[in-house]
Image (cartoon, rainbow, N blue to C red):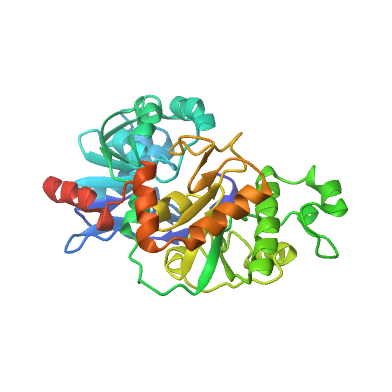
Amino acid sequence: MNLIKLLSYKFSFRKNKKVEILLVDDNYSYLNFENRKVGVVNFNEVNLYYVIKTLFNFKIKNENNLDFKKIYWKNVFSDFDPSVAIGNDINFRIFLFKDLFPEKISIVYQLGHYWDIHVSRSRDHLSGKKCDYFFIFSEWEKKIFEVIKTQFIISGSVKNNEVITKPNKNKYDIMFISEFRKLDKNTINKHKKGYHSYNFANKSIHMSFKDVCSIYALNILNEYCNSKNKKICIARSSFRKDKKNKISAEDEMKFFNEYLDTFSIEDIDSYNLSEKTNLCICIASNLGPELLARGKKVLFLNLNSLVNDWPFLPSDEGPFWYKGKDINVIKGKIDYLLSLSDEEWLEILKKSQVKMEFDANNKKLKKLVNEIC
């Protein structure tokens, strides 16, 4: 660990107290277990109590030839002494816990969507990993995770399941789900220009594929909202709790001001913003399928299907998805979906046979945890 990285950590000196449930992913999904002793491991903290203990173990009692880092985490986990540990599949911390404590029960949950292009790489990374239970989005993901010795439980997105929203009347016609990460100077012009402008054509070859797809969709939405007098809002990436201080809110606003004449933002989470919206537009964000699972009206503009092809969409075009770039088709689908009542939409969703699991309040996960401890 280099000095600069070390200085970015917080320091503490304390012995951990025993818990029933240990969350080893900083409780990324804000899981709530009522009337339970729950511990959350802070991986951005260096606990000097365990550093000293590890120094002793490393030199005197390292029977398994573990490296210093693994001995440190084994000491940290050990005093928590949980009945069950829970974590997501992305940061691999839950797999580290299972390696260090094979006798303990471990539960992994799928955090984000995978694409076909990810399958081979992900299987290589996950091969040989172990856990007792694995909560996955759908049957499709089994082909990725089958390299793990585990018991699968299909529950949809654990993160999505835990979110509670307040019903609201539609304030906006359209909500665009932002995929903004950082501002590329190539996406900004001195004068507002559309996707088909000469200026954009000169710069687009140097832009990220994600930005090009977003700008293409925004250009269409700008024309549509101006001509139809529709209100559009943005579900901002920078307002997500896990992205604060990582994505510039100011830069994100600069990006959308470049391609939309007027739009609204609110300082509420994207789930509750969707409750104020008739139709949500998604390109490749996890939020799109999560809202669909909740029964929200979502149009998937799968412009980047060459790389990110949603596995749950069975064809190139359907009532609420389109994997092409024909402007008239896209505008027609927006017209159609905006015209549907909530009852008509739910019937369309049912007939589409695109099934998205939603386990409100994570009843399956919490039932399992209660059975374990």
The quadrant holding residue 155 is: top left
Q: Nearer the viewer, residue 170 or 118?
A: 170
Depicted 225 relative to depicted 9: above or below? below
Measured along the vertical axis of the image, is residue 108 above or below residue 249?
above
Q: Is residue 31 left or right of residue 330?
A: left
Residue closer to the observer: 315 or 154 = 315
Residue 75 is drawn in which quadrant?
A: top left
Disc tally is: 0
Report the side of 93 relative to 174 (left or right). left
Image coords of residue 206 (percent x, y): 79, 44
Where does the N terminus fall, quadrant-wise? top right
Residue 192 in view here: yes
Rendering quarter of residue 98 = top left
> Is 74 or 127 nearer to us in this picture?
127
Q: Residue at x 56, y 49 (%)?
A: 283
Q: Position of residue 183 (x, y in %)?
A: 71, 57
Residue 226, percent from left and from top? 68, 68
Question: Is residue 104 left or right of 92 when viewed as pictured?
Answer: left
Residue 295 visible in the current orientation: no
Determine whether 126 is above or below 336 in the image. above
Q: Is residue 239 above or below residue 293?
A: below
Give the percent coordinates (x, y) of residue 366.
20, 52
- Which residue sits at x=79%, y=53%? 186
150 with respect to 324 (left or right)? left
